[in-house]
Amino acid sequence: MKPTASITRRRSARLVRTLAALSLVAAAAAAAAADDTAELATAYVLPDFVAAAPTVPGGDAAAAWRLELGEALRLAVRHNLGVTLERESLNIARRGVDLARAELEPTVGATYRHGDVSAPPATSLEGGAGELFTTVDDAVGVSYQQRFATGLSLELDFATGRTRSSLGTAVEPLTIRSTVGLRVTQPLLRGFSLDLEIPRLTVLRARLASEREQRQLAIAIADVVERTERAYWDVVQALYRHDLEVRSVTHAEVQLVLTRRQIDAGVLPPSDVTGAESTLAQRQLQRVQSEQAVEQAWDRLRQVINLPRDQWSRPILTVETPRFAPEELDDERAMAAALVHRPECAQLDLDVVAAALAVRKADNDRLPQIDLGVSGSVVGQDASYGGALDQLASVDGAGWSVFVNMTWTPLHRASAAAAEIERARARVVGAQQEQLLQTIWFEVRDAVRNQRGAGRQVIAAARFRQLAEQNLELEARKFLNGTSSNFLVAQRQEEVAAAQLAELGALLGHHKAAAALLHATGLLLEERNIELEVAAP
């Protein structure tokens, strides 16, 4: 084990040095961008089209389900099918601990036996037939067995029997015999260790499996929470997009009215009305498409939450509005938080412990089986039950013995192969730890980069939207003065709509990136105030 441990330590040291070097480079590259983003974010103001809550397509707001993000997360954690399956798996694992503890439970047994034997009589010298001999016996036994955490096994037996015989060779016509026996056996080498881990190996493995399954439940809940949050913000985005498409239709309708007035005034040719009507038809098509997108977003959220089928027809109105509050991000601090809070790290730590136990068990199996035992018995025999029990109490018929049992396989072929297999598995677990560390480092850096980039996209999209709105305002004035066309106005309107959608997507992308970063660092459940509620088995 020492060479393997040193190799693992060297690998871990190399990996930590590599991660430290990468973090220095990333910190230097991200410092300037973070400062610029923080400076711009202080002057950011939410646009008018997201300052208020969105509306429901069709205008049926009274029948809509006003859903908060926290409520959606709680419902998903409680009803999601994946989480439900993981809860049942955890209950099974916890029952496995009780099953393993059953090895230490006492066992009580009872027996009853009745026998009736008839023997033919011996032939007399005169040739006559003798009397038929019979033997009738009844026996009752009670036993108690128990195995202790040290590997010691205890067996206690009590038996009493009554024999009635008409044979001439019988000691008494009626004999009652009672026996009390005690046997204690303790393994000394194989199956025993001073820290009691080897004799309690089954219970320890079951506990490790239960703890690992609890971490798996945390992983499943965190995944569902992030998926629910993403689905919730997708609904928010779809609703706001629908509102924007409705406004675009209104703008196109207003533009059509203005165009007809310009044509009536002789400023524009009659052919320009076709372009305005085409723009209006296009905006109406986009509004229909946005309504379909809202329905799809609702269904995805309903699926994650696992709503009952009879509630799928009810529209959902999200209560949460987007906001922009960028934070200072640091790869190293995020990585340190991930190593502490990620349940995957705790799972692999449990796997390391389980692998070490398996190696110890394999090495212990190579030892000789040497069991030290003590046995004793007390016998009472009389023609009455009282007399037989009195003899048991007087211990006149007591006896005892000490014994040693030894079993040994000199070649150790099977046990040596099993030990090497477990050592190889332990090395695999060590490599998996390094692999997980690299994976977490990549996920944390990617999440930090995505959130930082999402914040910068919000600033850039806001600037793009402001300029697009200014261009539209200028183009509308030109149109009223007769120096522009419907085509240019429609183009500027399209630019404003695209800029608004881009800013909306950037805002909600920042929310999703923040949730992804919390998920990568293992802090998502804590930040969302979600506790692991597991029913007792």
Image (cartoon, rainbow, N blue to C red):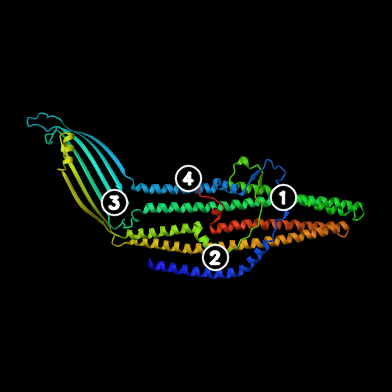
Q: CA distance from mark 3 to mark 2?
A: 51 Å
Q: Does the residue at mark 3 contact the one at mark 4 (Cβ under 8 Å)?
A: no
Quarter that holds the C terminus:
top left
Residue matched to label 3: 152
From the top left corner, tell me how far across and down residue 95 is, in percent: 42, 47
In-front residue for pair 121/394: 394
Identify the image quadrant of the N terminus: bottom left
Q: Viewer-nearest of labels 1 and 4?
A: 4
Percent x, y of residue 241: 71, 52
Residue type at tag 1: His
Report the amino acid beneath label 4.
Ala
Q: Are marks 1 and 4 in contact (CB under 8 Å)?
A: no
Mark 1, other Cα within 10 Å: few <14 / some 14–19 / many ≥20:
many
Tell me the CA gap for discs 3 and 4.
Answer: 35 Å
Judged from the image, the secondary structure of the residue bearing numbered disc 3 is loop
Q: Position of residue 350 (x, y in %)?
A: 44, 57
Please tell me which of labels 4 and 2 falls first in the chain.
2
Q: Residue at x 45, y 45 (%)?
A: 536
The residue sitting at 74% across, 57% down in the picture is 498
Q: Quadrant of residue 390?
A: top left
Q: Amino acid at mark 2?
A: Glu
| First along the sequence among labels 3 and 4 | 3
Ranked by sequence position, the earlier of labels 1 and 4 is 1
Residue denoted by label 1: 242
The residue wearing badge 4 is: 535
Which of disc 3 and disc 1 is earlier in sequence? 3
Q: Is residue 125 left or right of residue 219?
A: left
Q: Residue at x 46, y 59 (%)?
A: 348
Report how far apart the C-alphas of labels 2 and 1 lie in the structure: 41 Å
